[in-house]
Amino acid sequence: MRPITYFHGLVALLLTIGLTGCGAATSSSSGNVEYRNIWIINADGSGEAELVYSDLDLSNPRFSPDGTQITLDTSNTLSVIERRSDVYVASVNVDSSRGIATSNLDESGAQWSPDGTRLAFEVDGSIWVMTIATGATSNIAVGHRPIWSPDGQTIAYDYDGIRVVSANGGSSQLIGPNGTQPAWFSTGDALVYALSSGSSSTIKRVTFPGGTITTLASGSNPVVHPSTTTVVYERDGDLFAKAVGGTESLVALASNSAAYSPNGTKLAYVYTANGSNQIAVISVSATASVSILTTGTRPAWSPNSQKLVFEKRVLR
């Protein structure tokens, strides 16, 4: 059995979570073992702490809308050629956790509904929705990487393009042929996505439900501002920003994994320098200065825009 330990204050609770096989950690030349776990930090760089520890590979942390819990993926190496992931929910303020999707299948990428009552996640290439209070689940579509609409009524996802489907299931609609990486505008009446062609990628905007497609910029991995039409995206290893109908601007060199704070005032991202991945935060204002908080990857904001959870590799 593989343990996960959840830390809060000075208390540590060891929870055995029913995963067997070889752990996902790797050994260093010094003989220490490297683990990827989940950490938390204040947006000003203070209060860094290890939030969830395991000898499994932990990734993809996301705060619940009320800020009291996070979802995360656990990845376990079952054999030389097989890995399996499961989805867990961990409390931020109390030492408790529970698996919400743990089976012999591959579960990952849980996304909270805007009201925090449901989770959408991927199970072996299908999109499932769970009602948290009851644990009831339904398979609503075949696809990958579900993303909730702002009103919680619709889910966008990848499957031979960008598709949308009711969160309750039903017929899906193809709105972005051959696209990937969907992201909703806050108004819910349009999405952006990436369209790859050879070695290049273009950011497209598509109206919903109309399906009118326009080109926004060249790039990939679009992230939309929570209250405006500005989109941050990656191109050639750098971050750029552009509003619909606006002009492009450079945000940061050698950076990726952008995430807007929910209040729209800050942008977190990963800055790579000398082979080290660092969590950076910048104000959205034009006179912004960059704050390097710590080493890590894949930052995600708390709902009150005061904290970040992220992945971090450490040697023990």
Image (tube, rainbow, N blue to C red):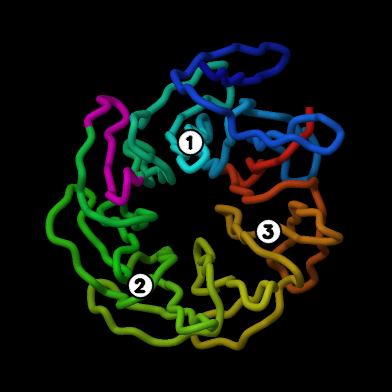
Question: Quick one: label 2 or label 1, which is nearer the N terminus?
Answer: 1
Check the image and report above or below for 315 versus 246.
above
Observer-side mark, 2 or 3, equals 3
- Name the residue carrying label 3: 269
Mark 1, Cα crowd under 10 Å, few <14 / some 14-19 / many 20+, is many
Mark 2, Cα crowd under 10 Å, few <14 / some 14-19 / many 20+, is many
Q: Which of 74 and 304 is in front in this view?
A: 74
Mark 3, Cα crowd under 10 Å, few <14 / some 14-19 / many 20+, is many
Check the image and report above or below for 195 versus 314.
below
Q: Evaluate whether residue 74 shows in this view.
A: no
From the top left corner, tell me how far across and down residue 256 is, in percent: 66, 64
CA separation, marks 1 and 3? 20 Å
- Name the residue carrying label 2: 190
Residue 58's quadrant in the figure?
A: top right
CA separation, marks 2 and 1? 26 Å
Q: Is residue 304 left or right of residue 116?
A: right
From the top left corner, tell me how far across and down residue 290 is, in percent: 81, 61
The residue lying at 43 percent from left, 78 percent from top is: 195
Q: What element carries label 1?
A: strand
Q: In which quarter of the image is the C terminus?
A: top right
Q: What residue type is labelled 1?
A: Thr
From the top left corner, tell me how far across and down residue 60 is, in percent: 54, 44
The residue lying at 49 percent from left, 82 percent from top is: 202
Question: Quick one: label 1 or label 3, which is nearer the N terminus?
Answer: 1
The residue lying at 49 percent from left, 83 percent from top is: 198
